[in-house]
Image: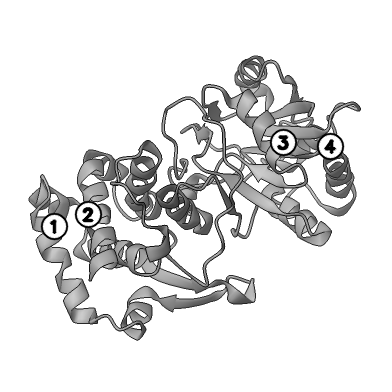
Amino acid sequence: MNVSAAVMTHPTRLAAAQRLCAALAPIDATPAVDPEPHATPGAMRSARLAWAASDPDATHHLVLQDDIELAEGFAAAVAASVALHPDAAISFFVEWGSRTAALVRWAALAGVSWVPMINPYVPTQALVMPAPLARDLAAFLRDETDDAEPDDEAILRFLQRRGTRMLAAVPNLVEHLDLPSLTGNEGHGVRRAACITGEPAAAPGPTVLQLPALLPFLAWVDATATTIDTTDRTFSARTPTLDVLTAHGYDGDRLVAACEPALAGLTDPDGLRAGIDAKYLTELWITAVAMGALGRQYRPGADLDHPAVRAALRTTAPGALRTHVDFAVLERHTDDLAALVTAGLRYGWTA
């Protein structure tokens, strides 16, 4: 396999893009600089250039954004990934509050290296695909999009039209940095990876997580415990997660009441209650219980101390609550929030 690469960037962040290009060695990478930097902010102009920059001899083409940090051994992991799934579009980043992030957490528990992407967009922070497909994508972006369309939504439209399998790596191999958004995403809050271990990239296995019929997650838009019915493949049929659990035989009142003793057992329950509204803690608890109850097949044979499992569970609360709770509070109580998620997961497994 021979991978070429380009880094989407803006003239004000060219130095960051050049550093990423150097870090990608031995993959040969080039910056794709927004040709109209003073126009309305958007990613599409640099995306067109980046996807058109595939090397003629490359089997695959990788495009990255300039505001990411790579895991050690990233280039080797890319090569191993495209060898395992040569026909897929593969993302190495999943945003921690997205629907796909819920799959990432189950995959981490199950020890599986891949999940299908089910967001209404394709994560484009670090995305690789076969080079012929990348060249067709470049033509599509040139001919069938305007500058205002988000590149991640346009790419999803293209890949769905082509019937391309879309996968995301677990653990994630890039972290999104907290830099000022150049595309108008400030209102989305801090957007980090769903599962980043901080360890060198390990060789991925071939297994892809099977898409479950019911997917519980804590929706970042309104911080509610929500379950998606995935069977229609539109991922638009949503039900309150507590209703789903009740339909599966759980006593809803008893389940919600179990949150209080779990909170009391944390390191700083009073600080947690003072900084985070009780309704958010309850919705987080319901989501964690559902992760266990509806995902018993993903329960690991060992304890929950694997680095990928720890990393995935720690992002559950901040990923969903980042626009509803002071982010400094979420960071201060990261350990307790992760412990609450873990307690809910265990409750769902055993109740």
Q: Which of marks 3 and 4 is in front?
A: 3
Going from N to C along the chain, the mark reached first, 3 or 2, is 3
Going from N to C along the chain, the mark reached first, 2 or 4, is 4
Give left or right: position of 35 versus 258.
Answer: right
Going from N to C along the chain, the mark reached first, 1 or 2, is 1
Q: Nearer the viewer, mark 1 or mark 4?
A: 4
Q: Position of residue 260 (x, y in %)?
A: 12, 64
Which corner quadrant holds the N terminus?
A: top right
Q: Where is residue 162 in the image (x, y as percent from the top left)?
A: 83, 57
Q: Give the alpha-carbon distance from disc 1 to disc 2, as whole Å.
A: 7 Å
- The amino acid type, in three-letter code, at marker 1 is Leu
- The amino acid type, in three-letter code, at marker 3 is Ala
Out of 305 and 340, give the one closest to the viewer: 305
Q: Give the alpha-carbon distance from disc 3 to disc 4, as whole Å.
A: 13 Å
> Do the residues under discs 1 and 2 have CB atoms within 8 angstroms?
yes
Q: Which residue lies under the disc numbered 4? A: 131
Going from N to C along the chain, the mark reached first, 1 or 4, is 4
Which corner quadrant holds the C terminus?
A: bottom left
Tag on residue 231? none
Give left or right: position of 48 versus 198.
Answer: right
> Do the residues under discs 3 and 1 have CB atoms within 8 angstroms?
no
Tag on residue 340? 2
Going from N to C along the chain, the mark reached first, 3 or 1, is 3
x 52%, y 22%: residue? 72
Q: Which residue lies under the disc numbered 3? A: 83
